[in-house]
Image (cartoon, grey):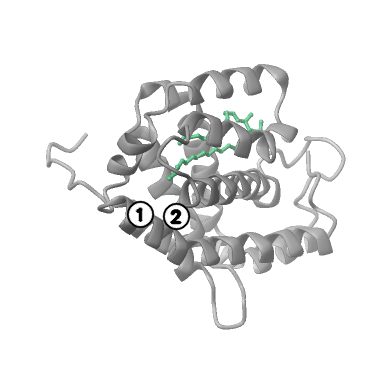
Amino acid sequence: SDSVPEEKFSLKEVLITFQSCLTDNQEIVTDSYVNGWRGLVRFMNSLGSIFSFISKDAVNKIQIMVTHRNGENGDKYETLQSMVKYELDNNLVDLQRRAEHPESGCRTLLRLHRALRWLELFLEKLRTSTEDSKTSVMCTDAYNDSLAQHHAWIIRKAATMAFCVLPGRAAFFQTMNVGSTEQVVAMLGEAMPFISKVYEITEELYKQHNLLELP
Ligand code: 1PX
């Protein structure tokens, strides 16, 4: 909608966002987490319209989280920890089946959390890949080891088909706009610990409260 040409962005800035998610006492800041996803979606959109069914769902979930943040009780959503406490204390989470609270912060964030595991696996594969590695294979393997387990057959089929048209490794690295292969590998090595940390803390939080299977 705006005519100002967007500056070519670097995936480095996006991945570094996950660093700013963590507070000193190991809480995860909702706004930074959501911003990280915004950047990832932007990157994915630059890969072509075949991924738009994926980015639509991600954008939808980002929007749900933003709506919670902007709502009357937005301050309760400042961190993932405060969100979980607030929603559970006030019975705002559907635990058995989707009913009164189909768009709870807890169930919505769980979907992004599972996708973050895919990202972690995929980035690690990219980081340790060699010239003849195939991005589509790395992406599919990462997906099968994570998100796929939570997706219906039809979604798995569509996702796996989309992965097939991913650009090859060299072109993919270029799209990341980080520099040479060595620089990409170094950047991934730098950013990954934060992504892993954010994943781990969220996983532990959800496990503690028995929220890992929210419908
Ligand atoms: C250097 C690499 C950077 C790549 C960045 C790519 C960002 C990917 C963002 C993907 C976000 C996907 C969120 C999916 C959430 C989800 O699991 N939703 C499903 C369940 O939701 P529900 O509300 O029904 O319980 C929903 O059914 C999903 C539908 C869309 C298909 C999801 C396929 C996910 C594939 C993820 C891999 C993206 C590959 C991008 C290629 C680089």
Q: Residue shown at 33%/43% (left/top)? A: 173
The residue under the point 59% across, 61% down is 196
The quadrant in which residue 47 appears is: top left
Amino acid at the residue labelled 2: Gly
The residue tagged 2 is 36
What's the residue at 55%, 83% (across, down)?
24
What is the secondary structure assignment of the residue under circle 2? helix
Query: Foreground: 179 or 15?
Result: 179
Q: Nearer the viewer, residue 71 or 9?
A: 9
Tag shown at residue 207: none
Q: Does residue 192 lie above or below 116 as drawn?
A: below
According to the image, label 1 marks what residue?
184
Residue at (67% x, 68% y) in the render: 81
Q: Nearer the viewer, residue 181 or 206?
A: 181
Q: Residues within 10 Å of mark 2 (few under 14, many from 20)?
A: many
* Closest to the observer, 100 or 7: 7
Q: Position of residue 114 (x, y in %)?
A: 65, 46
Q: Quadrant of ligand 1?
A: top right
Mark 1 belongs to which amino acid? Answer: Val
Residue 16 picture location, percent across and down: 40, 63
Q: Earlier in the sequence, mark 2 or mark 1?
A: 2
